[in-house]
Image: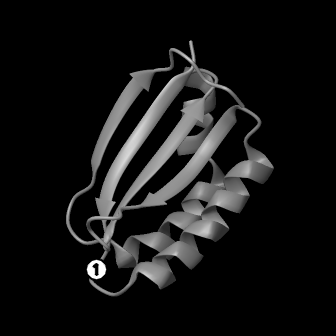
Amino acid sequence: MMIGIMIELTVKAGSGPEFERAFAIQAEAVRANEPGNSLYALFRSREAPDGYTLVEIYEDEDALAAHRNSPHMAANRPLTLPFLAGRSETRAFDVVSHVA
């Protein structure tokens, strides 16, 4: 069964553009190196300018584990972490319907 992940996060005030640039590097690495990932998309809130939601879809638990343990994620996390403010909230889902 496919797995969906949603991460709600907030960045430090005014750091959105820098966070988005750092995230784009991370997202490109995911797309290039993770065949088991079918969605890795960042959304900026319309109500809270420093609020973001990351939505991810993986084909199975093995693909999710490969993502979490990948060298490119280890290399790219330090690019985005300095921009985060507070704790993020992560939720996992079983994907019921997904159109690629």
The quarter of the picture where residue 88 lies is bottom left
- Circle 1 SS class: loop
Residue 39, percent from left and from top: 63, 41
Left or right placement of residue 96 versus residue 12 in this view: right
Q: Amino acid at mark 1?
A: Lys
Q: Residues within 10 Å of mark 1 (few under 14, many from 20)?
A: some
Query: Residue at point 21% right, 59% down?
Result: 87
Residue, disc 1: 12
Left or right placement of residue 50 versus residue 72 in this view: left
Query: Residue at point 55% right, 68% down?
Result: 23
Left or right placement of residue 39 versus residue 9 in this view: right
Residue 55, percent from left and from top: 48, 44
Quadrant where the N terminus sits is top right
Query: Residue at point 35% right, 64% down?
Result: 46
- Tell which of 44 and 9 is nearer to you: 44
The answer to whether 50 is drawn above or below residue 13 in the figure is above
* Residue sticking out furthest to the left: 86
Residue 97, percent from left and from top: 56, 18
Residue 81, percent from left and from top: 40, 70
Numbered marks: total:
1
Left or right placement of residue 52 versus residue 59 in this view: left
Query: Residue at point 37% right, 29% down?
Result: 92
- Tell which of 8 and 73 is nearer to you: 8
* Residue sticking out furthest to the bottom: 14
- Tell which of 42 and 73 is nearer to you: 42
